[in-house]
Amino acid sequence: MAHDAPLTQQGAGDGAAAELDRLLARFLKYHPDRIDLSLDRMYRLLDDLGDPQRAMPPVIHVAGTNGKGSTVAMIAAALEIAGKTVSVYTSPHLVRFAERYHVAGETLSDEALLALFEEVERTNAGKPVTEFEITTAAAFLAMARAPADIAIVEVGLGGRYDATNVFDRPAASVITPVGLDHQEFLGNTITAIAHEKAGILKADTPAIVAPQDPDAARAIAETAEVVGAHLWRAGTEWTLEPGRDGGGTYRRGDTVWPLPPPGLLGRHQLANAATAAACLDVCDLPGVTRDAIVQGLRNVTWPGRTEWIQRGDLAERLPQGWELWLDAAHNPHAARALAETFRELSARDGRPLHLIFSVLADKDLDGFLAPFVGLVASATAVPISGEARARETEALATAARQAGLDAHTAATIPAALDLTAQRDGPARVLIAGSHLLVGAALQENRTSAPRWLDQVGGHFCAH
């Protein structure tokens, strides 16, 4: 099963982090020769572990192509503001593997995660299993043992056969916008991919559906009807009316809530915020008030998503008046939303935009680049160090030139910034194209690794 970040630590050092790397590498020996589309291995492993997924708090299960992480972060932020103890499992990570595990309000330490992985490995007893199944089982084990009010679980890939799809009756299922990605696993059409995403829907369970392509919306509705899920769809059971200030109005029947401009930048984030609000509205959890939801949406944080980097080693390489931004967009749908955000920023002050990018070989490179044509003043391709799945930089630059971009290559992210900084400014620089690239940039930018790493994957909002 493919994922957008490696099952290793970026820049892992001695101690538990290095041991995690060794253990994750060892998991590969259990990988089955043939990946069958079923959950049999996952159910067998969970059964051997005592079915921890049945002992977890009520689960909000989130699938989709884009916006999953942001929507998860917004739901979690609102719940934490409301005083709830929240567990969250997401993927991929940016720097530390432990970022994926937010258990009872805290990110797991490398030592705690190592102990969990070793326990799951012992229980598995050498049977065929994928690394994502092992790491997901570890998450469920941790969440079952730590008292919390609710758990939020993000699908890794697809939905129907994803290792997370083992909950008989979640509190809610959420489907964020569906687009083309991972076609080699999910199908070559929006309809096929949406059917796979909708595989998380369950009978008599609310299904909150974000704004969708019409083909995706039909596929989700068809699946909901078959399984007996209760649909709450954007534009039908609930609506979002964008406002002039970056916020909007959420409506469901007689319920009308003003939504603030969300803490995450970009017009697309308002739709994610409305989806999060709809989920919490439909779930109607005790003590989760409208005010808590609004405050959570306003204050949410989520590293590597349209993030303005104002301090650090990389930021300081740019001249006065320049800005450095990071975003983990890696498919055409996400790239379009990202380009629209920066088109609006450029329209405000006229500052040009420069792109530093890299994508993996299984991604739609032309589709990623297309939204930036006519928007960016230059594009610089960089390698992703140590990643066999990354495209060669010259191939990246060639594709960018063929798309009509002024494209170049650089050996490192700092070298790309130095090259870009020679151009006229002030300007903005955007590093985008892969979670791996953004994680590497965050590693390069840090000025105090222990302090910075402690912040990644922590609370989802500032209290």
Image (cartoon, grey):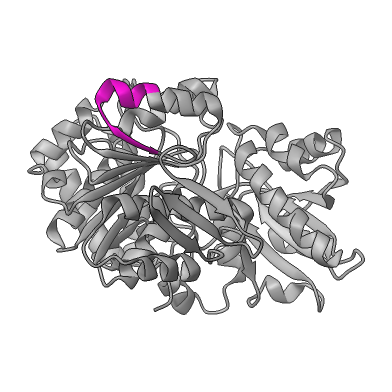
Q: Is 102 or 421 nearer to us in this picture? A: 102
In the picture as drawn, the residue positioned furthest to the front comes out as 254
In the picture as drawn, the residue positioned furthest to the right comes out as 424
What span is in magenta?
222-232
Of the 4 image quadrants, the one containing the N terminus is top left
> Image point 43% across, 44% down: which residue?
238
Q: Is 284 or 107 nearer to us in this picture? A: 284
Expressed as whole percent of the image width and height from the top left, the position of residue 343 reads 77, 54
Compared across the picture, whether 87 is left or right of 56 comes to: right
Expressed as whole percent of the image width and height from the top left, the position of residue 411 reads 74, 53
Q: Specify the quadrant of the image occupied by residue 446.
A: bottom right
The answer to whether residue 412 is visible is no
The answer to whether residue 362 is visible is yes
Q: Is residue 111 above or below residue 382?
A: below
> Image point 25% across, 32% down: which residue?
202
Total tally of numbered discs in the picture = 0
> Image point 27% across, 63% down: which residue?
86
Compared across the picture, whether 144 is left or right of 413 comes to: left
> Image point 25% across, 55% down: which residue?
151
Expressed as whole percent of the image width and height from the top left, the position of residue 250 reads 47, 54
Expressed as whole percent of the image width and height from the top left, the position of residue 207 reads 33, 38
Q: Specify the quadrant of the image occupied by residue 49.
A: top left
Compared across the picture, whether 219 is left or right of 307 comes to: left
Q: Is residue 433 above or below residue 260?
A: above
Give yes or no for residue 238 being in the magenta stretch: no
